Amino acid sequence: MKTEIYDAIVVGSGISGGWAAKEFCEKGFKTLVLERGRMVEHKTDYPTSLSNPWEMPHRNKIILAEKEANPVVNRCYAYAEDTQHFFVKDQEHPYQQEKPFDWIRGYQVGGKSLTWARQTQRWSKYDFEGPARDGFAVDWPIRYEDIAPWYSYVERFVGISGNRDGVDTLPDGEFLPSWTMNCVEKDIRDRIVENYSDRNVLIGRCAHLTKPQEHHLNMGRGQCMARNQCYRGCPYGAYFSSNSATLPAAMATGNLTIRPDSVAHSLIYDDRLEKVTGVRVVDAESKDLKEYYAKVIFLNAACLNTNLILLNSTSNRFPEGLGNDHGLLGKYIAFHNYRGNILADVQGYEDKYYFGRRPTSVMMPNFRNVHRQEMDFLRGYMTFYTAGRGGWGGVRDAPFGEQFKELNSEPGPWHVYMMMQGETIPKAANHVRLSKELVDPWGIPQLVVSVDYDDNDEKILQDFFSQGSDMLSAAGCSNIRTIDTKQAPGLDIHEMGGVRMGRDRKTSMLNGYNQMHACKNVFVTDGACMTSTGTQNPSITYMALTARAVDYAVSQLKKGNI
């Protein structure tokens, strides 16, 4: 008997899953959130959020044995002794790297919303028009005007700090007061803008409450303290996470049920009804199979896991995976190219310093191929930079005693760090599929990942090195050196695609409302839905797409179309 019946099931509780839960619950729908990881309660389950370095057994370092056992997750920027409980260790959920790919995951209620970098730039019209104009991927079924109201809707709830800069390549939003550049960053900005008419240099926009509004305070969220301890979980609720914002809002309605330790195995397709009736789940602890049923299903398990679930959802109607009539499922995976770094020194400013640990950097929207194709590569890249003073505690050869203390209590010279965030072009060759031989600890086929860079990515990297070095030189910096990290795809943690949106069901999996062409009561609104990657951080777009998709799904349910 189908005893576990809900109005809606949301698979995943991270950035997009939390939004799906909030929207359904606030619209009166009894909603089940299935999370494969453990329960994490806001504040209660952030064990290191207020810890001092000397209170951690290894002073916030990962011991050598753990590094050797977990080489993939150990490469993540946010992984350390104080955050390791929010990350999946390499052997806990094995996968097959046909080509090198660092799959960074967070299995707990809240997912990676507890450890994300919180940068939130809207896409512009050029991003949604890009594939059709430049002839790659497929045409997005929406344009900026379709999603703009939903950007505003989620921004007001989330709390985004930023300036209204009036730049068409990076549209303005609903902002709280912005963070500020320090004196060196301002001078670099001024010299770049003076020397390059096509460059805009702006302070970053991020999901931090610089000035909480009444609705934020009513939820128990407070002002950001600029502590730079965000990846531990914020006890003040000052940055946006599912745990501090969307899930509590959903819970307050009385319509939410969260079931942690529930690994989604597959969606249950009914050949007679021609729709999905529920989700098959493996209990993470007992390994027992369970089934939950609902009128509508939202997949928000994060890009690669959503692809995995759909590939494993086979039936007489869909023997190759749900909705996979044309073999598109799992293909056209893309990501952001983070391989380029530039370092430089800055002379002077030795009487200047700055306050706090700002949670964002200076950003420069893409300036390549914006209005037309003009380079020998497709698309472009965002640029980010920060300037700061090093030297604290770095004088190792000072005499022991008072002089050692004095020398190590002074800041050193100024340095600049610049990085790129390049758009990659979705290709059929970049794909994921299910292993035919190996299964994971829950009896589900392991995911095989075959994703790599191409010549276009190399050209973008070299252009960044050239342009970034020239800009820093024009800004008066010295000792400029470029670094190719040679990191594998995946370490950007911005994987997208595999279940892409489009106008034609023959060339895409989802329509303009994130609804599966072949199965009307299934929606995908996490990174798997993306048709292309743009150059901006993607999370605010996932949130806006999710809120928009729920609104549409509810309207279709009320009309009896689902």
Image (cartoon, rainbow, N blue to C red):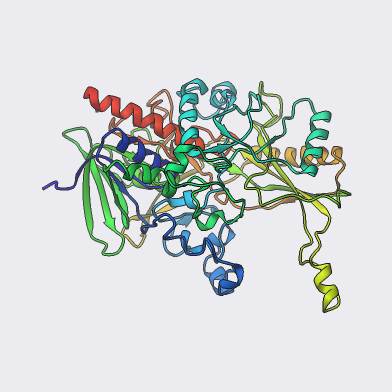
Q: Is residue 457 above or below residue 501?
A: below
In screen coordinates, is 514 left or right of 1?
A: right
In percent of width and height, residue 292 lies at: 22, 47
Q: Nearer the viewer, residue 83 or 264?
A: 83
Task: Name the residue at 37% across, 45% down.
Answer: 247
In screen coordinates, is 99 left or right of 403?
A: left
Tally of marks: 0
Q: Is residue 510 above or below residue 105?
A: above
Determine the image quadrant of residue 190. top right
Task: Name the residue at 24% across, 36% down.
Answer: 317
- Residue 72 can be seen, yes or no: no
Q: Is residue 395 above or below residue 229?
A: below
Quadrant housing the C terminus: top left
In screen coordinates, is 265 left or right of 191?
A: left
In screen coordinates, is 226 left or right of 449?
A: right
- Residue 107 can be seen, yes or no: yes
Task: Name the residue at 50% across, 25% down.
Answer: 148
In percent of width and height, residue 561 lies at: 24, 24
Q: Looking at the image, which residue sits at the far bottom?
A: 400
In percent of width and height, residue 30 lies at: 24, 40
Q: Nearer the viewer, residue 251 or 77?
A: 251
In percent of width and height, residue 481 lies at: 81, 50
Determine the image quadrant of residue 81. bottom right
Q: Nearer the viewer, residue 302 or 32?
A: 32
Determine the image quadrant of residue 210. top right
